[in-house]
């Protein structure tokens, strides 16, 4: 009887283990993270850490060390310097636009011409028996030139809204009539006017043309300089098995996507931890609520101009709420309700029920954290995808956006009061939050599932859209439409000619008759 029980127990455990995703086929995964930016790594590192925790053997080549280096996680350091944006001053970034974003990305790509030489890439090629490579895909296809040497399926991961060239490589529809791109001048979604569609089309096409004409050749030359003969990088990109992208339609809006593109928006969000005791007490006692103000890890508050800083201080001093401001160093004339610190546990602060408002630069990580806790936001977008996220925020109605350069004390005061007083902002935050969190699998489980899927199906070639292998004129059916237009035109011309000769005949006969009778 006892024996039977043990057998039954072992049998059940066996079944459970066999059903546990990934068990029994733990894979060798190579991660390649060439971007130093902290916000990038806050998205990508947890994903690799999770893969290792679940028993895969992960080798991570990157700039920042994962938390779980050990039997399942090997870390190899890339000697890449900061991408030039770390520690930027506020005033330098005031005019973030489509052009400055493009220039920043070109600058980043240019810097690799020196930086790649600082690391011994041949040493990486000694890594053997890899099942899949996961590469962060950002400003260009450059690093595909290296990881393609492993000759295994490639998964691309991107930490914000996809760039137009990402969609182009993977034959994702661009939907120019109603989807703005990453660093659009203005939001066209839901506008659909002639002007917005024209602007969006011109911007997106010019950014794609720029990418093809400048970035791709630059990346190709750099790849060949360091890693020898390299197939066309664009061709390597279109062979990618999967594209993991850190967005979610509940916030950014819907669009058609191929099955090879998987949204993992919110993958960086973990359950909140306990707050430090002093902060917990402060927030518990804040009867009128708390406002949290932080411009993220790149922008230092101390680099803000004095008049802007003083304007913010005067507005904060009038509020009955407690204000927490991520600020490095001393602050003159600090009002009693203002508390500063060079670092705050943002995720955990967001989870406190007394937090009423988040003021930030609209980086996607902070936005996703705020959405998770149904928090209204005031955005001061600076660069990159921040203006794009701010546009989505306004469209979804759970916050407002201010242009930092032109902000005045009066505008700042009015905007804060509006978001705090009008109930629609909180209601919309709750609506978006509920939709953001309601998924069949968590963002992390989704990312891990599809990664293991690609491994199980040996690169899952069936996910690739045939459109990836078509020329633009084939994809848009330009030749077919031209043929149809030619046929219609020929028929119309024939009809016109026939009618004309018929009428001429009629007219001539009549005139002939007329001439005769007269
Ligand atoms: C490493 O992987 C094994 C399975 O291969 C797993 O049982 C173990 O929990 C993992 N260890 C850590 C520290 O993640």
Image (cartoon, rainbow, N blue to C red):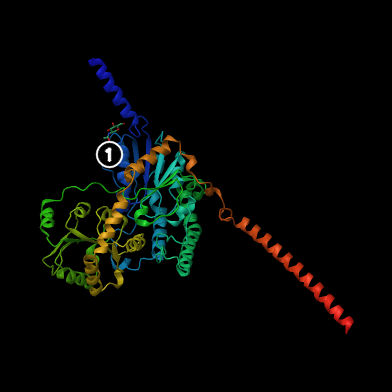
- Closest to the observer, 57 or 410: 410
Q: Can residue 149 be seen by looking at this rendering?
A: yes
The quadrant in which the N terminus is found is top left
Residue placed furthest toward the bottom: 518
Is 7 drawn above or below residue 233 in the view shown? above
Q: Position of residue 387 (x, y in %)?
A: 35, 63
Q: Position of residue 115 (x, y in %)?
A: 38, 52
Q: Secondary structure at mark 1?
A: loop
Q: Position of residue 300 (x, y in %)?
A: 24, 62
Q: Which residue is mark 1?
A: 69
Q: Residue at 51%, 59% (x, y): give it.
A: 213
| Quadrant assignment, res 381 | bottom left
The quadrant in which the C terminus is found is bottom right
- Closest to the observer, 308 or 399: 399
Is 174 drawn above or below residue 515 in the view shown? above
Q: Residue at 32%, 39% (x, y): give it.
A: 51
Q: Can residue 220 be seen by looking at this rendering?
A: no
Q: In the image, is 5 to the left or to the right of 515? A: left
- Closest to the observer, 255 or 113: 255
Ligand 1 picture quarter? top left
- Dot 1 surroundings within 10 Å: few (below 14), some, or many (20 or more)? some
Residue placed furthest toward the right: 516
| Quadrant assignment, res 102 | bottom left
Q: Position of residue 45 (x, y in %)?
A: 31, 45
Q: In the image, is 128 to the left or to the right of 444? A: right
Q: In the image, is 122 to the left or to the right of 371? A: right
């Amino acid at each position: 009887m006892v024996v039977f029980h043990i057998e039954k127990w072992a049998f059940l455990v066996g079944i459970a283990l066999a059903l546990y995703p990934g068990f029994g086929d733990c894979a060798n995964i190579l991660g390649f993270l060439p971007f130093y930016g902290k916000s990038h790594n806050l998205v990508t590192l947890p994903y690799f850490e999770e893969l290792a925790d679940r028993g895969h053997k992960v080798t991570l080549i990157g700039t920042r060390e994962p938390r779980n280096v050990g039997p399942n996680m090997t870390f190899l350091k890339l000697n890449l310097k900061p991408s030039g944006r770390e520690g930027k001053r506020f005033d330098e970034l005031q005019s973030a636009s489509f052009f400055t974003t493009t220039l920043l990305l070109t600058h980043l790509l240019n810097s690799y011409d020196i930086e790649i030489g600082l690391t011994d890439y041949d040493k990486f090629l000694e890594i053997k028996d890899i099942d899949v490579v996961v590469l962060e895909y950002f400003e260009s296809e450059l690093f595909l030139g290296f990881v393609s040497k492993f000759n295994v399926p490639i998964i691309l991961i991107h930490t914000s809204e996809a760039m137009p060239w990402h969609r182009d490589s993977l034959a994702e529809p661009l939907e120019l009539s109603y989807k703005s791109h990453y660093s659009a001048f203005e939001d066209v979604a839901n506008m659909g006017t002639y002007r917005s569609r024209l602007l969006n089309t011109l911007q997106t096409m010019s950014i794609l043309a720029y990418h093809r004409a400048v970035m791709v050749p630059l990346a190709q030359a750099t790849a060949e300089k360091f890693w020898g003969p390299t197939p066309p990088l664009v061709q390597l990109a279109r062979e990618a098995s999967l594209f993991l992208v850190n967005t979610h339609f509940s916030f950014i809006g819907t669009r058609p996507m191929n099955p090879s593109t998987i949204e993992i928006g919110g993958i960086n969000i973990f359950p909140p931890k306990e707050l430090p005791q002093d902060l917990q007490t402060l927030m518990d006692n804040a009867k009128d609520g708390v406002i949290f103000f932080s411009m993220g890890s790149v922008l230092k508050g101390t680099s803000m101009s004095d008049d802007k800083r003083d304007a913010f201080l005067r507005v904060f001093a009038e509020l009955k709420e407690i204000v927490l401001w991520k600020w490095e160093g001393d602050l003159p004339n600090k009002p009693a309700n203002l508390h500063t610190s060079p670092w705050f546990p943002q995720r955990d602060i967001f989870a406190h029920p007394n937090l009423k408002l988040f003021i930030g630069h609209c980086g996607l990580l902070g936005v996703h954290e705020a959405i998770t806790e149904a928090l209204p936001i005031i955005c001061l977008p600076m660069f990159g995808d921040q203006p794009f996220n701010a546009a989505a925020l306004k469209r979804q109605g759970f916050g407002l956006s201010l242009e930092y350069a032109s902000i005045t004390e009066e505008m700042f005061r009015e905007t804060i009061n509006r978001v705090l007083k009008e109930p629609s902002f909180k209601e919309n935050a709750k609506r978006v939050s509920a939709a953001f969190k309601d998924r069949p699998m968590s963002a992390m489980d989704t990312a891990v599932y599809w990664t293991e899927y690609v491994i199980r199906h040996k690169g899952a070639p069936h996910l690739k859209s045939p459109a990836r292998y078509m020329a633009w004129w084939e994809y848009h059916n330009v030749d077919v439409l031209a043929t149809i237009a030619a046929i219609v035109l020929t028929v119309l011309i024939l009809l016109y000619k026939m009618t004309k000769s018929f009428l001429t005949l009629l007219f001539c006969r009549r005139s002939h008759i007329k001439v005769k009778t007269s």
